[in-house]
Image: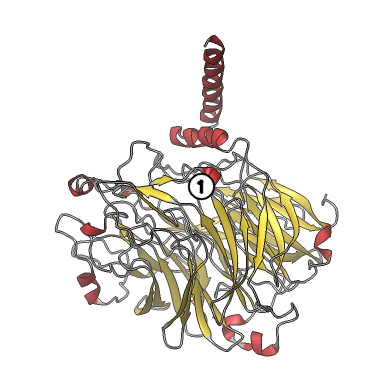
Amino acid sequence: MKRRNIILVSLLSLIVLIALALYLKGLSPITVVELVLDKFRSANSPTGTLVVELREAATVTPVGTPSAADMSSPANAQPSDAGSWLSYNRTLTSQRYSPLSQINTETIRGLKILCIYDTHLNESFQTGPLMVDGALIGTTVHDIFSIDPSTCRENWRTHEDYELKPESNLVNRGAAYLDGRLFRGTLDGRVLAYDFKTGKCLWATSIADPKIGEVVDSAPIAWNGLVFIGNAIGDIKGVKGRMYALEADSGRIVWETYLVPKTPGERTRGPQGLMPASAITTWKNPPDVPITGGATWTSYTLDPVTGRLYVPVANGAPDFVMDLRQGVNLYTNSVVVLDAKTGTYVNHFPIDGGDWHDWDVSNTPSIITTRGGKQLLSLTPKDGHVYGFDLATSQLLYRNPVTRIENADAPLSTDKDVHFCPGSVGGGEWNGVAYDPQTNLVLSGENEWCTTVKLLPDAKVKAAGNGEIWMGNSKINPLDLFGKQDPIADWAGWVYATDADSGEWKWRLKSNYPTLSGLTPTGGGVVFFGDMGGNLYAVDASNGHQLWGQKLDGAVAGGLITYTSDGSQKVAVVAGLSTSITFPTKVATAKIVILGLGGPQQ
Protein backbone atom coordinates (compact mmCIF):
# COMPACT_ATOMS: atom_id res chain seq x y z
CA MET A 1 0.00 0.00 0.00
CA LYS A 2 2.79 2.41 0.93
CA ARG A 3 4.59 1.69 -2.35
CA ARG A 4 1.40 2.33 -4.33
CA ASN A 5 0.84 5.66 -2.55
CA ILE A 6 4.40 6.75 -3.29
CA ILE A 7 3.90 5.95 -6.99
CA LEU A 8 0.58 7.83 -7.04
CA VAL A 9 2.06 10.91 -5.35
CA SER A 10 5.01 10.85 -7.77
CA LEU A 11 2.67 10.64 -10.73
CA LEU A 12 0.52 13.51 -9.50
CA SER A 13 3.62 15.59 -8.85
CA LEU A 14 4.81 14.95 -12.40
CA ILE A 15 1.43 16.01 -13.79
CA VAL A 16 1.53 19.22 -11.75
CA LEU A 17 5.06 20.02 -12.92
CA ILE A 18 4.17 19.43 -16.58
CA ALA A 19 1.02 21.55 -16.25
CA LEU A 20 2.95 24.37 -14.54
CA ALA A 21 5.62 24.37 -17.23
CA LEU A 22 3.02 24.56 -19.99
CA TYR A 23 1.06 27.29 -18.19
CA LEU A 24 4.21 29.37 -17.84
CA LYS A 25 4.62 29.14 -21.63
CA GLY A 26 1.47 31.28 -21.87
CA LEU A 27 -1.02 28.56 -22.75
CA SER A 28 -4.60 28.73 -21.51
CA PRO A 29 -5.64 26.43 -18.62
CA ILE A 30 -7.80 24.32 -20.96
CA THR A 31 -4.93 23.94 -23.43
CA VAL A 32 -2.66 22.91 -20.56
CA VAL A 33 -5.16 20.24 -19.52
CA GLU A 34 -5.39 19.00 -23.11
CA LEU A 35 -1.61 18.71 -23.43
CA VAL A 36 -1.19 16.95 -20.09
CA LEU A 37 -3.94 14.48 -20.98
CA ASP A 38 -2.40 13.82 -24.38
CA LYS A 39 0.98 13.24 -22.74
CA PHE A 40 -0.44 10.31 -20.81
CA ARG A 41 -3.13 9.09 -23.23
CA SER A 42 -0.59 8.68 -26.02
CA ALA A 43 2.06 6.97 -23.89
CA ASN A 44 3.28 3.60 -25.15
CA SER A 45 1.66 4.10 -28.55
CA PRO A 46 2.34 1.13 -30.83
CA THR A 47 4.38 1.15 -34.00
CA GLY A 48 2.44 2.00 -37.12
CA THR A 49 1.20 -0.88 -39.26
CA LEU A 50 -0.48 -1.18 -42.67
CA VAL A 51 -2.53 -4.11 -43.95
CA VAL A 52 -3.33 -4.01 -47.69
CA GLU A 53 -6.16 -5.82 -49.44
CA LEU A 54 -6.77 -6.07 -53.20
CA ARG A 55 -10.31 -6.64 -54.42
CA GLU A 56 -10.70 -10.09 -55.91
CA ALA A 57 -10.44 -9.98 -59.70
CA ALA A 58 -9.87 -6.21 -59.54
CA THR A 59 -7.75 -4.73 -62.28
CA VAL A 60 -6.13 -1.32 -62.18
CA THR A 61 -4.54 0.06 -65.30
CA PRO A 62 -0.75 0.04 -64.82
CA VAL A 63 0.62 3.41 -63.87
CA GLY A 64 1.62 5.51 -66.85
CA THR A 65 1.29 8.98 -68.23
CA PRO A 66 -2.41 9.99 -68.35
CA SER A 67 -3.79 10.09 -71.87
CA ALA A 68 -4.58 13.37 -73.59
CA ALA A 69 -8.26 12.51 -73.22
CA ASP A 70 -7.86 11.98 -69.48
CA MET A 71 -6.33 15.43 -68.99
CA SER A 72 -8.14 17.46 -71.67
CA SER A 73 -11.17 18.20 -69.50
CA PRO A 74 -11.09 21.56 -67.69
CA ALA A 75 -11.82 19.70 -64.43
CA ASN A 76 -8.59 17.73 -64.81
CA ALA A 77 -6.50 20.61 -66.16
CA GLN A 78 -3.16 21.21 -64.44
CA PRO A 79 -1.59 24.59 -63.60
CA SER A 80 1.00 25.82 -66.08
CA ASP A 81 3.60 25.59 -63.29
CA ALA A 82 3.64 21.86 -62.56
CA GLY A 83 6.05 22.33 -59.67
CA SER A 84 3.81 24.63 -57.63
CA TRP A 85 0.98 24.07 -55.14
CA LEU A 86 -1.17 27.17 -55.48
CA SER A 87 -4.29 26.34 -53.48
CA TYR A 88 -5.34 24.27 -50.47
CA ASN A 89 -6.01 21.22 -52.67
CA ARG A 90 -3.52 22.32 -55.36
CA THR A 91 -6.21 23.10 -57.96
CA LEU A 92 -9.49 24.94 -57.49
CA THR A 93 -11.25 21.70 -58.48
CA SER A 94 -9.60 20.01 -55.45
CA GLN A 95 -8.11 16.93 -57.11
CA ARG A 96 -4.76 17.06 -55.22
CA TYR A 97 -2.94 15.23 -58.04
CA SER A 98 0.60 16.36 -58.89
CA PRO A 99 2.16 15.31 -62.23
CA LEU A 100 5.69 15.36 -60.75
CA SER A 101 7.49 12.05 -61.23
CA GLN A 102 11.10 12.44 -60.07
CA ILE A 103 10.04 10.71 -56.85
CA ASN A 104 8.54 7.48 -58.17
CA THR A 105 8.09 3.81 -57.33
CA GLU A 106 11.81 3.20 -57.93
CA THR A 107 13.48 6.33 -56.52
CA ILE A 108 11.25 6.53 -53.42
CA ARG A 109 13.76 4.39 -51.52
CA GLY A 110 16.09 7.37 -51.41
CA LEU A 111 13.55 9.77 -49.84
CA LYS A 112 15.00 11.50 -46.76
CA ILE A 113 14.22 14.36 -44.44
CA LEU A 114 16.02 17.47 -45.71
CA CYS A 115 14.99 19.98 -43.06
CA ILE A 116 12.35 20.77 -40.45
CA TYR A 117 10.66 24.10 -39.74
CA ASP A 118 9.54 24.04 -36.11
CA THR A 119 6.99 26.68 -35.11
CA HIS A 120 7.70 25.93 -31.41
CA LEU A 121 3.94 26.04 -30.79
CA ASN A 122 1.58 23.47 -29.32
CA GLU A 123 -1.69 23.47 -31.20
CA SER A 124 -3.88 21.35 -33.44
CA PHE A 125 -1.66 21.87 -36.48
CA GLN A 126 -3.69 21.25 -39.64
CA THR A 127 -2.53 23.91 -42.07
CA GLY A 128 -2.53 23.15 -45.79
CA PRO A 129 0.79 24.55 -47.06
CA LEU A 130 1.11 26.43 -50.35
CA MET A 131 4.13 26.49 -52.65
CA VAL A 132 4.10 29.75 -54.59
CA ASP A 133 6.85 31.60 -56.46
CA GLY A 134 9.76 30.02 -54.62
CA ALA A 135 8.25 30.17 -51.11
CA LEU A 136 6.37 27.72 -48.93
CA ILE A 137 3.50 29.32 -46.98
CA GLY A 138 1.91 28.03 -43.78
CA THR A 139 -0.33 29.25 -40.96
CA THR A 140 -0.80 28.70 -37.25
CA VAL A 141 -3.62 30.07 -35.09
CA HIS A 142 -1.86 33.41 -34.69
CA ASP A 143 0.86 33.39 -37.35
CA ILE A 144 1.39 33.25 -41.09
CA PHE A 145 4.88 32.46 -42.35
CA SER A 146 7.00 32.07 -45.46
CA ILE A 147 9.96 29.67 -45.58
CA ASP A 148 12.49 28.49 -48.12
CA PRO A 149 11.04 25.30 -49.68
CA SER A 150 14.44 23.58 -49.78
CA THR A 151 16.15 24.63 -46.56
CA CYS A 152 13.26 25.61 -44.21
CA ARG A 153 14.94 28.97 -43.64
CA GLU A 154 12.35 31.51 -42.52
CA ASN A 155 11.74 34.39 -44.94
CA TRP A 156 9.25 36.16 -42.68
CA ARG A 157 6.67 35.40 -40.02
CA THR A 158 3.80 37.70 -39.08
CA HIS A 159 2.05 37.36 -35.72
CA GLU A 160 -1.53 38.48 -35.03
CA ASP A 161 -2.13 39.08 -31.33
CA TYR A 162 -5.80 38.63 -30.48
CA GLU A 163 -7.74 37.20 -27.56
CA LEU A 164 -9.24 33.70 -27.67
CA LYS A 165 -12.01 32.14 -25.64
CA PRO A 166 -10.50 29.60 -23.18
CA GLU A 167 -12.30 26.70 -24.87
CA SER A 168 -11.12 27.62 -28.38
CA ASN A 169 -9.98 24.81 -30.62
CA LEU A 170 -6.48 25.91 -31.62
CA VAL A 171 -6.67 25.28 -35.34
CA ASN A 172 -6.29 27.08 -38.65
CA ARG A 173 -6.41 25.20 -41.94
CA GLY A 174 -4.36 27.44 -44.18
CA ALA A 175 -4.10 30.35 -46.57
CA ALA A 176 -5.03 31.25 -50.14
CA TYR A 177 -2.93 33.07 -52.73
CA LEU A 178 -3.87 35.46 -55.53
CA ASP A 179 -1.92 38.13 -57.41
CA GLY A 180 0.81 38.76 -54.87
CA ARG A 181 -1.43 38.53 -51.81
CA LEU A 182 -2.09 35.88 -49.16
CA PHE A 183 -5.40 35.49 -47.31
CA ARG A 184 -6.32 33.68 -44.10
CA GLY A 185 -9.03 33.49 -41.44
CA THR A 186 -8.67 33.94 -37.67
CA LEU A 187 -10.36 32.61 -34.54
CA ASP A 188 -11.56 36.10 -33.67
CA GLY A 189 -13.77 36.13 -36.77
CA ARG A 190 -11.67 38.06 -39.29
CA VAL A 191 -10.21 37.53 -42.74
CA LEU A 192 -6.75 39.06 -43.26
CA ALA A 193 -4.71 39.85 -46.37
CA TYR A 194 -0.90 40.02 -46.50
CA ASP A 195 1.79 41.02 -48.95
CA PHE A 196 3.30 37.78 -50.28
CA LYS A 197 6.88 39.07 -50.31
CA THR A 198 7.00 40.80 -46.92
CA GLY A 199 4.16 39.47 -44.76
CA LYS A 200 2.82 42.96 -44.18
CA CYS A 201 -0.90 42.97 -43.31
CA LEU A 202 -2.83 44.83 -46.00
CA TRP A 203 -6.42 44.69 -44.78
CA ALA A 204 -8.73 42.99 -42.27
CA THR A 205 -12.46 42.26 -42.58
CA SER A 206 -14.72 40.87 -39.86
CA ILE A 207 -17.21 38.19 -41.00
CA ALA A 208 -18.01 36.46 -37.69
CA ASP A 209 -18.79 37.29 -34.06
CA PRO A 210 -16.30 35.70 -31.61
CA LYS A 211 -18.43 36.79 -28.64
CA ILE A 212 -20.97 34.09 -29.47
CA GLY A 213 -18.34 31.50 -30.41
CA GLU A 214 -18.07 32.08 -34.16
CA VAL A 215 -14.63 31.60 -35.71
CA VAL A 216 -13.03 31.53 -39.15
CA ASP A 217 -10.74 28.50 -39.23
CA SER A 218 -11.20 27.23 -42.80
CA ALA A 219 -8.71 27.69 -45.62
CA PRO A 220 -10.05 30.21 -48.15
CA ILE A 221 -9.72 29.88 -51.90
CA ALA A 222 -9.23 32.79 -54.31
CA TRP A 223 -10.23 33.35 -57.94
CA ASN A 224 -11.02 36.15 -60.35
CA GLY A 225 -10.35 38.93 -57.85
CA LEU A 226 -12.40 37.33 -55.06
CA VAL A 227 -11.63 35.48 -51.83
CA PHE A 228 -14.14 32.84 -50.69
CA ILE A 229 -14.49 31.81 -47.06
CA GLY A 230 -17.17 31.01 -44.46
CA ASN A 231 -17.69 30.98 -40.71
CA ALA A 232 -17.72 28.15 -38.13
CA ILE A 233 -18.78 26.75 -35.52
CA GLY A 234 -22.32 25.47 -36.10
CA ASP A 235 -22.26 23.30 -32.95
CA ILE A 236 -22.91 26.42 -30.83
CA LYS A 237 -26.47 27.45 -30.05
CA GLY A 238 -27.63 30.27 -32.28
CA VAL A 239 -24.72 30.21 -34.75
CA LYS A 240 -25.71 30.03 -38.42
CA GLY A 241 -23.36 29.17 -41.25
CA ARG A 242 -22.68 31.84 -43.86
CA MET A 243 -20.49 32.01 -46.94
CA TYR A 244 -18.68 35.13 -48.17
CA ALA A 245 -16.93 36.57 -51.18
CA LEU A 246 -14.48 39.36 -50.38
CA GLU A 247 -12.79 41.70 -52.81
CA ALA A 248 -9.14 40.60 -52.89
CA ASP A 249 -7.82 44.16 -53.29
CA SER A 250 -9.72 45.75 -50.42
CA GLY A 251 -11.50 43.16 -48.27
CA ARG A 252 -14.90 44.62 -49.11
CA ILE A 253 -17.71 42.09 -48.70
CA VAL A 254 -19.07 41.45 -52.19
CA TRP A 255 -21.78 39.07 -51.01
CA GLU A 256 -22.94 37.15 -47.94
CA THR A 257 -25.07 34.01 -48.22
CA TYR A 258 -26.79 32.34 -45.27
CA LEU A 259 -26.45 28.57 -45.67
CA VAL A 260 -29.43 27.90 -43.40
CA PRO A 261 -32.59 30.05 -43.30
CA LYS A 262 -32.05 33.63 -42.21
CA THR A 263 -34.78 34.99 -39.97
CA PRO A 264 -35.94 38.60 -39.52
CA GLY A 265 -33.67 40.80 -37.43
CA GLU A 266 -30.50 38.83 -38.00
CA ARG A 267 -27.38 40.75 -38.89
CA THR A 268 -26.34 41.32 -42.50
CA ARG A 269 -22.75 42.20 -43.35
CA GLY A 270 -23.07 42.71 -47.09
CA PRO A 271 -25.31 42.21 -50.14
CA GLN A 272 -27.30 39.02 -49.70
CA GLY A 273 -26.95 36.01 -51.98
CA LEU A 274 -30.37 34.66 -52.91
CA MET A 275 -31.41 31.35 -51.35
CA PRO A 276 -34.73 29.48 -51.81
CA ALA A 277 -37.28 30.79 -49.32
CA SER A 278 -38.80 27.32 -49.08
CA ALA A 279 -35.81 26.05 -47.08
CA ILE A 280 -37.45 27.34 -43.88
CA THR A 281 -40.19 24.73 -44.24
CA THR A 282 -37.64 21.92 -43.84
CA TRP A 283 -36.93 22.99 -40.25
CA LYS A 284 -39.70 21.84 -37.88
CA ASN A 285 -38.27 23.52 -34.79
CA PRO A 286 -40.41 24.53 -31.82
CA PRO A 287 -40.49 28.32 -31.27
CA ASP A 288 -37.92 28.09 -28.46
CA VAL A 289 -35.36 26.14 -30.54
CA PRO A 290 -33.47 28.50 -32.86
CA ILE A 291 -32.29 27.32 -36.26
CA THR A 292 -28.61 26.54 -35.71
CA GLY A 293 -25.75 25.02 -37.71
CA GLY A 294 -24.75 24.78 -41.34
CA ALA A 295 -21.29 26.30 -40.86
CA THR A 296 -18.13 25.55 -42.87
CA TRP A 297 -14.79 24.58 -41.36
CA THR A 298 -12.42 23.20 -43.97
CA SER A 299 -12.08 24.63 -47.53
CA TYR A 300 -13.96 24.95 -50.81
CA THR A 301 -14.03 23.92 -54.46
CA LEU A 302 -14.62 26.05 -57.53
CA ASP A 303 -15.22 25.27 -61.19
CA PRO A 304 -13.44 28.09 -63.06
CA VAL A 305 -15.29 27.21 -66.29
CA THR A 306 -18.82 27.61 -64.92
CA GLY A 307 -17.96 30.04 -62.11
CA ARG A 308 -19.73 27.81 -59.59
CA LEU A 309 -18.58 27.56 -55.98
CA TYR A 310 -19.03 24.24 -54.14
CA VAL A 311 -19.49 24.71 -50.39
CA PRO A 312 -19.40 21.76 -47.95
CA VAL A 313 -22.03 22.56 -45.30
CA ALA A 314 -21.85 21.00 -41.85
CA ASN A 315 -24.46 19.66 -39.40
CA GLY A 316 -27.50 21.20 -37.79
CA ALA A 317 -27.73 21.63 -34.02
CA PRO A 318 -28.44 20.48 -31.38
CA ASP A 319 -26.31 17.84 -33.04
CA PHE A 320 -27.72 14.66 -31.50
CA VAL A 321 -31.30 15.72 -30.73
CA MET A 322 -33.19 15.31 -33.98
CA ASP A 323 -36.66 15.59 -32.49
CA LEU A 324 -36.04 19.29 -31.69
CA ARG A 325 -35.31 20.11 -35.36
CA GLN A 326 -37.31 17.60 -37.35
CA GLY A 327 -37.17 17.72 -41.15
CA VAL A 328 -34.23 17.58 -43.54
CA ASN A 329 -32.88 20.92 -42.27
CA LEU A 330 -31.76 22.47 -45.56
CA TYR A 331 -28.96 23.12 -46.32
CA THR A 332 -27.05 21.32 -43.59
CA ASN A 333 -25.09 18.16 -44.43
CA SER A 334 -24.96 18.93 -48.13
CA VAL A 335 -22.77 20.47 -50.80
CA VAL A 336 -24.33 23.80 -51.73
CA VAL A 337 -23.52 25.22 -55.16
CA LEU A 338 -23.45 29.01 -55.43
CA ASP A 339 -22.78 31.44 -58.24
CA ALA A 340 -19.31 32.66 -57.32
CA LYS A 341 -19.97 36.21 -58.52
CA THR A 342 -23.26 36.80 -56.72
CA GLY A 343 -23.61 34.15 -53.97
CA THR A 344 -26.94 33.08 -55.48
CA TYR A 345 -28.08 29.48 -54.94
CA VAL A 346 -27.71 27.22 -57.99
CA ASN A 347 -28.45 23.76 -56.55
CA HIS A 348 -27.30 21.38 -53.83
CA PHE A 349 -26.22 17.79 -53.35
CA PRO A 350 -27.85 16.27 -50.22
CA ILE A 351 -25.82 13.82 -48.13
CA ASP A 352 -27.39 13.21 -44.70
CA GLY A 353 -30.61 15.18 -44.40
CA GLY A 354 -31.89 15.06 -40.83
CA ASP A 355 -28.53 13.95 -39.43
CA TRP A 356 -28.40 13.04 -35.71
CA HIS A 357 -24.81 11.71 -35.46
CA ASP A 358 -22.82 14.93 -36.09
CA TRP A 359 -21.93 13.51 -39.52
CA ASP A 360 -21.00 16.79 -41.16
CA VAL A 361 -20.16 17.25 -44.79
CA SER A 362 -16.77 18.10 -43.45
CA ASN A 363 -14.36 18.42 -46.36
CA THR A 364 -14.00 19.72 -49.87
CA PRO A 365 -15.56 17.79 -52.74
CA SER A 366 -13.53 17.13 -55.87
CA ILE A 367 -14.67 17.88 -59.43
CA ILE A 368 -13.46 15.14 -61.79
CA THR A 369 -13.75 14.06 -65.39
CA THR A 370 -13.49 10.29 -65.11
CA ARG A 371 -11.83 7.97 -67.57
CA GLY A 372 -15.32 6.97 -68.69
CA GLY A 373 -16.15 10.59 -69.51
CA LYS A 374 -18.41 11.34 -66.53
CA GLN A 375 -18.37 14.78 -64.93
CA LEU A 376 -18.23 13.71 -61.30
CA LEU A 377 -18.55 15.36 -57.90
CA SER A 378 -16.77 13.12 -55.36
CA LEU A 379 -16.60 13.49 -51.58
CA THR A 380 -16.22 11.54 -48.32
CA PRO A 381 -18.01 13.21 -45.38
CA LYS A 382 -18.07 12.03 -41.78
CA ASP A 383 -20.74 9.38 -42.40
CA GLY A 384 -18.03 7.01 -43.67
CA HIS A 385 -19.09 6.72 -47.33
CA VAL A 386 -17.63 7.81 -50.64
CA TYR A 387 -20.14 9.61 -52.84
CA GLY A 388 -20.20 10.07 -56.59
CA PHE A 389 -22.67 12.52 -58.14
CA ASP A 390 -23.17 13.04 -61.86
CA LEU A 391 -22.70 16.79 -62.35
CA ALA A 392 -24.58 16.72 -65.64
CA THR A 393 -27.78 15.36 -64.05
CA SER A 394 -27.20 15.96 -60.28
CA GLN A 395 -28.03 12.27 -59.76
CA LEU A 396 -26.31 10.13 -57.13
CA LEU A 397 -24.29 7.46 -58.94
CA TYR A 398 -22.95 5.64 -55.90
CA ARG A 399 -22.67 5.77 -52.12
CA ASN A 400 -20.32 3.11 -50.79
CA PRO A 401 -18.80 2.56 -47.31
CA VAL A 402 -15.10 3.32 -46.85
CA THR A 403 -14.82 2.65 -43.11
CA ARG A 404 -16.68 0.65 -40.46
CA ILE A 405 -20.46 1.25 -40.45
CA GLU A 406 -22.52 -0.02 -37.51
CA ASN A 407 -25.86 0.88 -35.91
CA ALA A 408 -26.18 3.87 -38.22
CA ASP A 409 -29.99 3.88 -38.24
CA ALA A 410 -30.56 3.35 -34.51
CA PRO A 411 -32.33 6.32 -32.89
CA LEU A 412 -30.59 7.96 -29.96
CA SER A 413 -32.34 7.83 -26.59
CA THR A 414 -32.54 9.47 -23.18
CA ASP A 415 -32.98 6.01 -21.62
CA LYS A 416 -29.90 4.14 -22.79
CA ASP A 417 -26.48 4.43 -24.36
CA VAL A 418 -26.39 4.00 -28.14
CA HIS A 419 -23.16 2.97 -29.84
CA PHE A 420 -22.65 3.88 -33.53
CA CYS A 421 -19.95 3.84 -36.19
CA PRO A 422 -18.55 6.00 -37.61
CA GLY A 423 -18.52 8.01 -34.43
CA SER A 424 -19.02 11.74 -34.18
CA VAL A 425 -15.29 12.17 -34.88
CA GLY A 426 -15.11 9.22 -37.25
CA GLY A 427 -15.33 8.88 -41.00
CA GLY A 428 -13.85 11.57 -43.24
CA GLU A 429 -12.72 14.65 -41.36
CA TRP A 430 -11.14 17.88 -42.66
CA ASN A 431 -9.12 16.51 -45.60
CA GLY A 432 -11.14 15.29 -48.57
CA VAL A 433 -10.66 12.96 -51.50
CA ALA A 434 -7.87 12.99 -54.09
CA TYR A 435 -8.10 11.84 -57.71
CA ASP A 436 -5.38 10.01 -59.63
CA PRO A 437 -6.01 10.30 -63.40
CA GLN A 438 -3.36 7.65 -64.10
CA THR A 439 -5.43 4.93 -62.43
CA ASN A 440 -8.89 6.59 -62.44
CA LEU A 441 -8.97 6.09 -58.67
CA VAL A 442 -10.62 8.30 -56.05
CA LEU A 443 -8.53 8.09 -52.86
CA SER A 444 -10.02 8.70 -49.42
CA GLY A 445 -8.55 8.73 -45.92
CA GLU A 446 -10.83 7.72 -43.06
CA ASN A 447 -11.10 7.45 -39.29
CA GLU A 448 -12.49 4.21 -37.80
CA TRP A 449 -13.56 5.24 -34.33
CA CYS A 450 -17.01 4.72 -32.81
CA THR A 451 -19.03 6.80 -30.33
CA THR A 452 -21.55 6.13 -27.57
CA VAL A 453 -24.24 8.74 -26.85
CA LYS A 454 -27.09 9.10 -24.39
CA LEU A 455 -29.35 12.12 -24.81
CA LEU A 456 -30.32 14.80 -22.35
CA PRO A 457 -34.05 15.40 -21.82
CA ASP A 458 -35.42 17.98 -24.25
CA ALA A 459 -35.99 20.53 -21.49
CA LYS A 460 -32.31 20.50 -20.54
CA VAL A 461 -31.25 20.78 -24.17
CA LYS A 462 -33.47 23.81 -24.64
CA ALA A 463 -32.11 25.41 -21.46
CA ALA A 464 -28.65 25.90 -22.98
CA GLY A 465 -27.77 29.55 -23.45
CA ASN A 466 -26.94 31.18 -26.76
CA GLY A 467 -23.23 30.83 -27.44
CA GLU A 468 -22.93 27.50 -25.61
CA ILE A 469 -21.81 24.23 -27.18
CA TRP A 470 -25.08 22.57 -28.17
CA MET A 471 -24.68 18.84 -28.74
CA GLY A 472 -27.56 17.54 -26.60
CA ASN A 473 -25.74 14.54 -25.12
CA SER A 474 -25.65 13.57 -21.46
CA LYS A 475 -22.12 13.35 -20.12
CA ILE A 476 -20.40 12.92 -16.80
CA ASN A 477 -16.88 13.27 -18.13
CA PRO A 478 -16.38 16.81 -19.54
CA LEU A 479 -14.01 15.33 -22.12
CA ASP A 480 -16.96 13.54 -23.74
CA LEU A 481 -18.09 16.72 -25.45
CA PHE A 482 -18.87 14.93 -28.73
CA GLY A 483 -20.04 11.72 -27.06
CA LYS A 484 -17.92 9.01 -25.49
CA GLN A 485 -15.36 7.70 -27.95
CA ASP A 486 -14.24 4.07 -27.91
CA PRO A 487 -10.88 3.30 -26.24
CA ILE A 488 -7.97 4.41 -28.41
CA ALA A 489 -6.83 0.79 -28.57
CA ASP A 490 -9.85 0.31 -30.86
CA TRP A 491 -9.26 3.18 -33.26
CA ALA A 492 -7.90 2.71 -36.76
CA GLY A 493 -7.75 4.34 -40.17
CA TRP A 494 -8.39 3.45 -43.80
CA VAL A 495 -7.29 4.50 -47.25
CA TYR A 496 -9.69 3.36 -49.96
CA ALA A 497 -8.92 3.47 -53.68
CA THR A 498 -12.28 3.61 -55.49
CA ASP A 499 -12.86 3.39 -59.23
CA ALA A 500 -14.25 6.81 -60.14
CA ASP A 501 -16.69 5.40 -62.69
CA SER A 502 -18.08 2.33 -60.94
CA GLY A 503 -17.71 3.29 -57.26
CA GLU A 504 -16.12 -0.10 -56.49
CA TRP A 505 -12.99 -0.14 -54.36
CA LYS A 506 -9.96 -1.63 -56.11
CA TRP A 507 -7.60 -1.72 -53.14
CA ARG A 508 -7.78 -0.64 -49.55
CA LEU A 509 -5.38 -0.48 -46.65
CA LYS A 510 -5.91 -0.29 -42.93
CA SER A 511 -3.68 1.57 -40.47
CA ASN A 512 -3.72 1.13 -36.73
CA TYR A 513 -4.15 4.91 -36.49
CA PRO A 514 -6.79 7.24 -38.00
CA THR A 515 -5.81 8.48 -41.47
CA LEU A 516 -6.80 12.15 -41.60
CA SER A 517 -3.97 13.86 -43.49
CA GLY A 518 -4.16 15.12 -47.02
CA LEU A 519 -3.65 12.40 -49.64
CA THR A 520 -1.41 13.21 -52.57
CA PRO A 521 -1.13 11.02 -55.70
CA THR A 522 1.69 11.85 -58.12
CA GLY A 523 2.87 11.27 -61.66
CA GLY A 524 5.47 8.91 -60.25
CA GLY A 525 2.79 6.36 -59.37
CA VAL A 526 3.10 7.13 -55.64
CA VAL A 527 0.42 8.12 -53.11
CA PHE A 528 1.57 9.96 -49.98
CA PHE A 529 -0.42 10.12 -46.73
CA GLY A 530 0.10 10.16 -42.97
CA ASP A 531 -1.70 9.00 -39.84
CA MET A 532 -2.38 10.18 -36.30
CA GLY A 533 0.46 8.04 -34.99
CA GLY A 534 2.94 10.27 -36.80
CA ASN A 535 3.61 7.78 -39.58
CA LEU A 536 4.25 9.12 -43.08
CA TYR A 537 3.74 6.59 -45.87
CA ALA A 538 4.22 6.26 -49.61
CA VAL A 539 2.32 3.47 -51.36
CA ASP A 540 2.00 2.23 -54.93
CA ALA A 541 -0.99 3.94 -56.55
CA SER A 542 -1.92 0.83 -58.53
CA ASN A 543 -2.17 -1.62 -55.64
CA GLY A 544 -1.64 0.11 -52.28
CA HIS A 545 1.54 -1.77 -51.42
CA GLN A 546 3.86 0.15 -49.11
CA LEU A 547 6.94 1.54 -50.83
CA TRP A 548 8.39 3.67 -48.05
CA GLY A 549 7.65 4.88 -44.51
CA GLN A 550 9.02 7.30 -41.93
CA LYS A 551 8.06 8.00 -38.32
CA LEU A 552 7.74 11.75 -37.68
CA ASP A 553 7.61 13.72 -34.45
CA GLY A 554 3.89 14.36 -34.08
CA ALA A 555 0.57 13.34 -35.59
CA VAL A 556 0.28 13.82 -39.36
CA ALA A 557 -3.16 15.34 -39.81
CA GLY A 558 -2.73 18.43 -41.96
CA GLY A 559 -1.59 19.20 -45.47
CA LEU A 560 0.83 17.09 -47.46
CA ILE A 561 2.10 18.56 -50.72
CA THR A 562 4.75 17.97 -53.36
CA TYR A 563 6.52 20.57 -55.52
CA THR A 564 9.76 21.44 -57.31
CA SER A 565 12.47 23.54 -55.69
CA ASP A 566 16.12 23.98 -56.71
CA GLY A 567 15.49 21.69 -59.65
CA SER A 568 14.27 18.67 -57.68
CA GLN A 569 10.99 17.32 -56.37
CA LYS A 570 10.27 17.82 -52.68
CA VAL A 571 7.52 16.72 -50.29
CA ALA A 572 6.31 18.91 -47.41
CA VAL A 573 4.20 17.42 -44.65
CA VAL A 574 2.51 19.00 -41.62
CA ALA A 575 3.14 17.23 -38.29
CA GLY A 576 2.23 17.93 -34.68
CA LEU A 577 -1.47 17.88 -33.83
CA SER A 578 -1.66 18.52 -30.09
CA THR A 579 -4.12 20.33 -27.76
CA SER A 580 -7.00 18.12 -28.84
CA ILE A 581 -9.40 16.78 -26.21
CA THR A 582 -10.89 14.55 -28.90
CA PHE A 583 -7.74 13.08 -30.46
CA PRO A 584 -5.24 11.66 -27.92
CA THR A 585 -2.09 12.22 -29.98
CA LYS A 586 1.55 12.56 -29.01
CA VAL A 587 2.43 15.99 -27.62
CA ALA A 588 4.74 17.58 -30.18
CA THR A 589 5.31 21.08 -31.46
CA ALA A 590 3.77 22.08 -34.77
CA LYS A 591 6.24 21.70 -37.62
CA ILE A 592 6.63 21.35 -41.37
CA VAL A 593 8.93 18.56 -42.49
CA ILE A 594 10.49 18.79 -45.97
CA LEU A 595 11.75 15.64 -47.68
CA GLY A 596 13.55 14.93 -50.92
CA LEU A 597 15.98 12.65 -52.68
CA GLY A 598 19.43 13.22 -51.19
CA GLY A 599 21.04 14.46 -48.00
CA PRO A 600 19.96 17.23 -45.60
CA GLN A 601 20.03 20.79 -46.94
CA GLN A 602 22.29 23.36 -45.37
Can residue 27 be seen by looking at this rendering? no
Q: Along the horizontal axis of the image, is 327 left or right of 421?
A: left
**Residue at horizontal 54%, vertical 87%?**
374
Q: How many marks?
A: 1
Q: Nearer the viewer, residue 519 or 180?
A: 519
Q: In the picture shown, does residue 431 fall above or below 523?
A: above
Q: Residue placed farthest to the left in the image? A: 287
Image height of 490 relative to 173, above or below: above
Whether residue 125 is visible here, answered yes or no, is yes
Q: Position of residue 16 (x, y in %)?
A: 51, 22
Residue lying at the far top in this picture: please name it.
Answer: 2
Color scheme of the displayed model: secondary structure
Q: Residue at x 70, y 80 (%)?
A: 61
Q: Quadrant of residue 292?
A: bottom left
Choose between 162 and 537: the one closer to the eye.
537
Residue 164 position within the rendered picture, expressed as x and y whole percent measured from the top left: 42, 42
Q: Viewed as shown, does residue 418 lie left or right of 457?
A: right
Taking the image as shown, residue 238 lies to the left or right of residue 204, namely left
Residue type pointed to by label 1: Glu
At which x and y percent is residue 466? 25, 48
Q: Position of residue 503 (x, y in %)?
A: 53, 77
Q: Secondary structure at mark 1?
A: loop
Residue under circle 1? 160
Nearer the observer, 580 or 186: 580
Mark 1 Cα within 10 Å, few/some/many (few <14, many 20+)?
few
